[in-house]
Image (tube, rainbow, N blue to C red):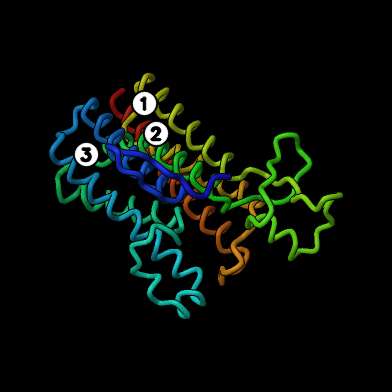
Amino acid sequence: MHPAISLVIGGVQLHTTSYRLFMVLGVLATVVLGFTVARGRGLPWRRVAVALVAMSVAFPVGARLFDAATKTEIYRREPWRLWSPDLAGFSMFGGLILTVAVGVVACQLLDLDLPRMADAAMPGLGAGIALMRVGCFMAGCCYGTRTDLPWGVTFPRGSNAHLHQLLGGSVFPLGGDPLPVHPTQLYEALAALVAVGFVLWLFRRGARDGTAFLLCACWYSAFRLLNGYLRVPGGELIVPAWFYPALYGIILGIAGGALLWRQNHSSMELRRAD
């Protein structure tokens, strides 16, 4: 856990948090990789650049709004948090939802091939999610529940995980060291990288445009649904326990339904051609 990071750039020392740094790196990776893959897949680079910039702006906006919608009490007490430039207080899934919505609108306005653009954006999104989750791990947020598995991680005294265990009345070993928890942040980073590898494999297989995006949406939503049971929910959340599982289930159903519809539609076209 390294919540604070110092960098020296051009002889100037900069101090920031790992959460902020890896969020910025994640957004940059999404844009750069998305642009590179889109160009390689024959999409017009100028229009792609505009769409990706719009999507990168949409991410923090959606993440902040979703965080405010699920933590209304803290935003009611401290309304300045809503428009604060501080890169903290975000809900990543909210950012992804608005990013996808803005991407759809941008493709319509810029006359971009939506399924092809969606597939091209997936490697960048996967890499961006992985980087952001590494930032969460280094910051000590989004931690998991208690585990005895050999890969369980122990956050230091005074960390959010330690405070949660203290408030929960956990019995600590001699010395009072925090207990190991699931590294849910790293689980999700790994799942995002698996999605990137899967997309690249589908590209080599010549999968139909849009297939990679829909399959990755199914995979990531299903993973978040399962990983959510290993993660300690934020203490300031006002939504019921079923909210996030229902949200992931809805997205999984929409993406899976669209995938099945496209598959059936393709099969019908092939039968007509015969």
- Sequence-wise, which precedes: disc 1 or disc 3? 3
Q: Are marks 2 and 1 in contact (CB under 8 Å)?
A: yes
Q: Residue under circle 3?
A: 113
The residue lying at 37 percent from left, 41 percent from top is 25
The residue lying at 63 percent from left, 64 percent from top is 241
From what the image shows, is residue 92 above or below residue 203?
below
Q: Position of residue 257 (x, y in %)?
A: 45, 46
Q: Residue furthest bottom?
A: 77
The residue lying at 45 percent from left, 37 percent from top is 215
Which label sits on residue 212? 2
Decide if residue 83 is in sight here: yes
How many residues crowd around disc 1 within 10 Å: few (fewer than 14), some, or many (20 or more)?
few
- Sequence-wise, which precedes: disc 3 or disc 2? 3
From what the image shows, is residue 87 above or below residue 135?
below
Q: Position of residue 18 (x, y in %)?
A: 46, 47
Relative to 255, 42 lies left or right:
left
The residue lying at 63 percent from left, 55 percent from top is 159
Q: Type of residue at label 3?
A: Asp
Q: Residue under circle 1?
A: 207
Write down the quadrant of residue 27 in the picture: top left
The CA span between labels 1 and 3 is 15 Å
Q: Type of residue at label 2?
A: Ala
Q: Position of residue 246 (x, y in %)?
A: 55, 59
Q: Position of residue 36 (x, y in %)?
A: 25, 30
Residue nearest the observer in this picture, 4 or 144? 4
